[in-house]
Image: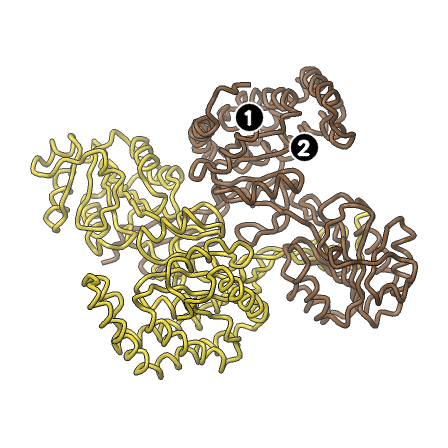
Chain colours: A brown, B yellow
Amino acid sequence: MDAAANPTDLIAEMGRRARAAALVLASLPTARKAAALALAAESVRAASAEILAANAVDMARATESGLSGALLDRLRLDSGRIAAMADGVAAVAALADPVGQVIDSRDRPNGLKLSRVRVPIGVIGIIYESRPNVTADAAALCVMAGNAAILRGGSEAVGSNRAIHAALVAGLEAGGVPADAVQLVPITDRAAVGAMLAADGVIDLIIPRGGKSLVARVQAEARVPVLAHLDGINHVYVDASADPAMAAAVVVDAKMRRTGVCGSMETLLIHRAYPDAAALIRRLADAGCMVRGDAAARALAPDIAVADTADWDTEYLDAIASVAIVDDLDAAVAHIAGHGSHHTDAIIAEDAAVAEHFLTAVDSAIVLWNASTQFADGGEFGLGAEIGIATGRLHARGPVALEGLTTYKWIGRGTGQVRG
Amino acid sequence: MDAAANPTDLIAEMGRRARAAALVLASLPTARKAAALALAAESVRAASAEILAANAVDMARATESGLSGALLDRLRLDSGRIAAMADGVAAVAALADPVGQVIDSRDRPNGLKLSRVRVPIGVIGIIYESRPNVTADAAALCVMAGNAAILRGGSEAVGSNRAIHAALVAGLEAGGVPADAVQLVPITDRAAVGAMLAADGVIDLIIPRGGKSLVARVQAEARVPVLAHLDGINHVYVDASADPAMAAAVVVDAKMRRTGVCGSMETLLIHRAYPDAAALIRRLADAGCMVRGDAAARALAPDIAVADTADWDTEYLDAIASVAIVDDLDAAVAHIAGHGSHHTDAIIAEDAAVAEHFLTAVDSAIVLWNASTQFADGGEFGLGAEIGIATGRLHARGPVALEGLTTYKWIGRGTGQVRG
């Protein structure tokens, strides 16, 4: 660990090298990038023993320092996980390349031919925690979209990340991608994160991958644009017109399929006139969910717990859900506007007009009709892989994949036009 | 002036009302927005006398306080300028509405039908200086794209802005747009700007309209995303293959058509092998431009001034240009990468391969081949009107018009899909 380096100077110097590499990457043809990523995937596979050895050292230190079981599981690599990581890199190489895509073109009356063309963003900083596979996943997505990546992983995974990074870069270089296209920040203290967040003009975009405290710090401190989501307080609204079997299946899936993912339902809203509300709440409880209801919900299902005001603003990330009975569609929309996190919200309804109103009125990155909120995922959306889900309003919303890692430029081709 | 209000509380309260208005605006059909803007244009025309009276008071106070002639001219309204302002509002009403546009759609193998649909951003803050017409221009663009606007104009134009704002809102309300869709910050001290810049989650986007010191402050302090450009250090590179008559016409236009606009050329780069370099430099000087050259340029045109190192990084916004002789295309690209501001850069060349390399390698919002940098303008690009030009990399680059004032949401329509 090059702890002697001043973090600001270090990031500035890494950024200069990343910018130079990004300029090379920006004009590499798709086939060259894909071939280099295929070599990187192969190189990760070939370095399995080194990566496992480094991971064993990280695991031993983490165990000694009392890291929790869940965090240890995130840190742990085995040959299956390394193979999956390599497969992930190879899969990114097969995705459609957004760079060079013409978004629109217009011929002006003066003969100037204008087009908007997708180009890479430039230098992307990824700040992540204990999962070492992010090193490979994030690097692959950045490179395929023509960007240089500056990676800052968690201190507990330092050896694993270095081994994965070394393997990746060896493969990329063999494929003609500059080594500086993927750089790992060599210091793992918090000052390195601060220097990245302050590196306006050096790093073009920061993507945090990790828990809420990391994302909150990044959003609070960053001078560089950030794509992220802080919360996934997602709602399923069951309309009076909902099909009961569908409502039960979707609600149970939305909450219980995986309770720890950002797309899981946290609050169930039920129309006052929905006839099967009591059975729906019971289905959720029977599936193992702790249900907390408002007074109207408890009147229907007296054995559920009491939801207090904090419940409506809580992302449980656990087998817990809050349930409210609402007067109508507008009340559901208002509840979501007041308590949601602009992530993913769904309506279950047979009435198409009601559903379309919901889809328009709910201001979230993803709005779904008759489908589970657990679909909030780049892979499920057919984007191939995602670098994260964004709940901000600018640049990219929802699952962010290759296209979200690009921007555009205006290109004008003329024959000597002057404005005169 | 409601100077008693705490600026943070004031902006929070304006933001709450703006958010509510934005939710109404987001689902207004195009025809309703257009009709309301047409009424707003009519209302501004009808309020001409009141606006002129308010402007006369602003002008008298500004003259007394010693405002410069250029600033007084920006502040001054007459019946022609008011008519032009009203025409501008009416013209925005005629633009294509981006809201509701389907960006892409994909049917998933499980039957889920996904689409990405353009939606308004939400609440946009506009911070501007002495030109009162920005009150109308910015409000019209925000409303047409379905956004609420919080406008903070310069203190010297306070009366003019209030009169224009009152007229606009009267017209919009008559057309069914909530009055809170366009709000004017009632206090004009700097604290109001600070409160807007800090209003993360209240204001979704800030667009500064004004001089460099305003933009620099906004970029330095904002916690809210900003679309802006700080500098327009634009280059014209004349390749060895350039047509001399075209090169001279474009270079003179790029620099001299209007020297004070952000799209004007500041630095001319000439390939060492371009045969007509001396004549080109003379043409620029003969057009009234003060030329500052490097040693090689001065060897060709000994009577020009010496460019020092600061010249390459200077936006003159005046009849001054720096000229450097470069060894080749790569040197031109490297010069632009080192000194440019990612705004607008042009190449003059007959060699298409050289030109295409330039268009790819130069990392600017706008890159032009055989055309003047003075085309950097939303109107010239066929966008109808622009709210500004952005040189950042995220969300929107180059001229920002209606589309740049929107974002998108993912809409998924299913038949009960669960992730399982």
Using the rendered image of the protein, determine whether residue A124 is visible from the camera's viewpoint.
Answer: yes
Using the rendered image of the protein, determine whether residue A107 is visible from the camera's viewpoint.
Answer: no
Relative placement, left or right, of B163 versus B414 is left
In the image, residue B257 above or below residue A83: below
Q: Residue at x 40, y 64 (%)?
A: B152
In the image, residue A17 above or below residue B170: above
Element under disc 2 = helix
- What subunit carries mark 1? A
Relative placement, left or right, of A158 versus B86 is right
- What subunit carries mark 2? A
Element under disc 1 = strand
User: Residue B164 at what x, y percent from top left?
Assistant: 37, 75
Q: Amino acid at mark 2?
A: Gly
Q: Residue at x 55, y 69 (%)?
A: B17
Q: Nearer the viewer, residue A195 or B109?
A: A195
In the image, residue A183 above or below residue B285: above
User: Residue B87 at what x, y percent from top left?
Assistant: 35, 75
Q: Amino acid at mark 1?
A: Leu
User: Residue A155 at what x, y percent from top left?
Assistant: 63, 26
Check disc 1 and report the residue beneath it.
Answer: A184
Check disc 2 and report the residue beneath it.
Answer: A88
Q: Nearer the viewer, residue B410 or B161?
A: B161
Which of label 2 and label 1 is nearer to you? 1
User: Residue B104 at what x, y percent from top left?
Assistant: 60, 55
Same-chain check, marks 2 and 1 = yes
Can you tell which quarter of the image residue B257 is in?
A: bottom left
Relative placement, left or right, of B318 versus A274 is left
Mark closest to the chain's N terminus, 2 or 1: 2
Q: Which mark is residue A248?
A: none
